[in-house]
Image (cartoon, rainbow, N blue to C red):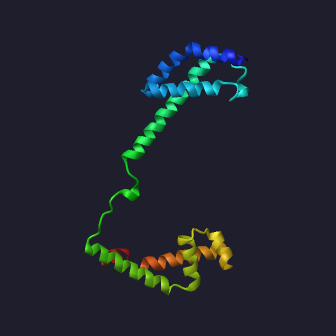
Amino acid sequence: MNDSAEKLDIFLSCRRALVNYAAQITQDRDRAEDVVQEAYLRLHPLQRPELQAIEQPVAYLYRIVRNLALDMRLSEAREQRRHAMPPDWLLPTLVASPEEACLHSDELEHLSSALADLPEQSRRALEMHRLGGKTLAQIAEQLGVSLATAHRLVRDALVRLARALPGDDTRDQQRD
């Protein structure tokens, strides 16, 4: 299949059947027409010169139409799902009760106080790791310490912050 006119003749001879085939997949005749036109463009030598030696052009066209139609259906389904469920930032948030808000505020105060009480190097290591997204190797390099020391600094800071959180007494008694 070397001649552009020959490809056009083959395309025109099976165009109606290709549209019917695509319409079965897309469930829409207009979209099926678009799919078939796109299939021809993919077959045309100006678009794809490496396709000069297609042995079964009709089968190749059917394969192109099938793939394009399925891609279109999947794309539309994704789009419908995206519009059906709004993004998380549009969903209403649950308002905490005044008691919960007070508890969270107290916990934040404890954490803030515990963070301020950390040794400078531990606090910096924790901030770099948890807030800055740095790896332990980057922290070690920046602080001028070994990798093991950087790990220890972050771990110790996390342990101190966890202990600073107010917990109920039964949990503390269960650990003993």
Q: Give 11 or 73, whichever is nearer the viewer.
A: 11
163 sits left or right of 130 in the view = left
Residue 100 location, x and y as percent?
29, 73
Identify the residue at horizontal 45%, vertical 23% (top origin): 23
Q: As displayed, is residue 28 above or below residue 13?
A: below
Q: As displayed, is residue 92 above or below residue 54?
A: below
Q: Give 149 or 80, whichever is nearer the viewer.
A: 80
Identify the residue at horizontal 40%, vertical 82% (top origin): 110
- Observer able to see residue 98: yes
Q: Quadrant of the C terminus?
A: bottom left
98 sits left or right of 161 in the view = left
Q: Quadrant of the N terminus?
A: top right
96 sits left or right of 60 in the view = left
Residue 131 location, x and y as percent?
53, 71
- Observer able to see residue 55: no
Q: Quadrant of residue 174?
A: bottom left
Residue 44 location, x and y as percent?
66, 24
Residue 7 location, x and y as percent?
66, 17
Q: Quadrant of residue 138?
A: bottom right
Identify the residue at horizontal 62%, vertical 14% (top origin): 10
Identify the residue at horizontal 56%, vertical 81% (top origin): 122
Q: Quadrant of residue 28?
A: top left
